[in-house]
Amino acid sequence: MPFLSDVAFRHTPTDAGRRTAGRTLAGRLLGGRVVGLMEQEATSRLQLHDLQLAQANRTVLEHVDGRFRDGAITALVGANGTGKSTLIQGIMGMLKPVAGRVACSVPKERRAWLPQQLALDLTFPMSVEELVMTGSWPSHGALVGYCARHYRRGREVMARLGISHLAHRPLGELSGGQRQRALIGRTLMQEAELLLLDEPFANVDSETVDVLMTVLRDMAASGATLIVVLHDMEQLSRLADEVVVLANGHAHWTSPQAIAEGHAPVAGTARLTLGIPGVSTC
């Protein structure tokens, strides 16, 4: 299975790389500022305007301009330390910009972030059903009891993900794939319109990957905006409509076709290593 670290990025895109087929045109450098070029008719409820983000007084990303198209899945790729987590934090409002702004018209209760499974406390006594049901908290409230409609919706979500038989199973007793299905179920319960996912297919079985990809594509088809951190080339080609490559402190909008052909418009000619475990990025 090919990984994105196997792709060498060249400076100049080919004609094939410029073709969009209804997706983002390849990004280009304009006066040192990278702009994500989108189709004029495309709508977007999430836009970045000359965004600059820093961690511990160190600039991580700067002059980021672009938009994430409604009803599309954008893959976020880059080597370790290039700012993927920083950008997610900025978009979710967890990190205040040094300059520029994040313009998001999606209601806060419809925004969801699914971190890596390693962030989940498996010792907390919660069942699959209880986790899924917490998806109603942002709009319904955490201290208000569930009604019949909530339970009916929860059962529908679990059935859609093939985890109905696990409803009362503690999270700590689940496989990696089962846990990820439950976590995605929480976002479905929330009816998220903006969903950010950090390596959602890591350490899960191939059947779960197929199920989750179908669910994510259905969410995009319903108009949701999805941003997915990916490292696997095959998964990117199967799932992504657009790609944002983070490198050298900038964000470069491009297409899955350009990535696959090794012609993403990333400044410089160095090979881009995307943080595959065991691969040094030094």
Image (cartoon, helix red, strand yellow):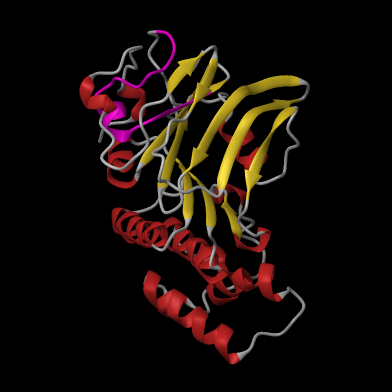
- Provide the residue span drawn in magenta: 251-268
Q: Position of residue 195 (x, y in %)?
A: 53, 53
Q: Is residue 160 left or right of residue 66?
A: left
Which residue ends up furthest to the top in the rendered image? Answer: 269
Q: Is residue 80 above or below residue 208?
A: above
Q: Is residue 8 above or below residue 201?
A: above
Residue 126 sits inside the magenta stretch: no
- Quarter containing the N terminus: top left
Residue 173 appears in the rendering: yes
Residue 261 sits inside the magenta stretch: yes
Q: Is residue 10 left or right of residue 244?
A: left
Residue nearer the viewer, 59 or 62 = 62
Quarter location, residue 149: bottom right
Residue nearer the viewer, 218 or 186 = 218
Residue nearer the viewer, 1 or 31 = 31
Q: Position of residue 26 (x, y in %)?
A: 36, 27
Q: Position of residue 203 (x, y in %)?
A: 42, 47
Q: Residue at x 58, y 19 (%)?
A: 249
Q: Residue at x 39, y 52 (%)?
A: 204
Quarter location, residue 236: top left
Q: Residue at x 36, y 62 (%)?
A: 218
Q: Position of residue 133 (x, y in %)?
A: 59, 75
Residue nearer the viewer, 274 or 268 = 268
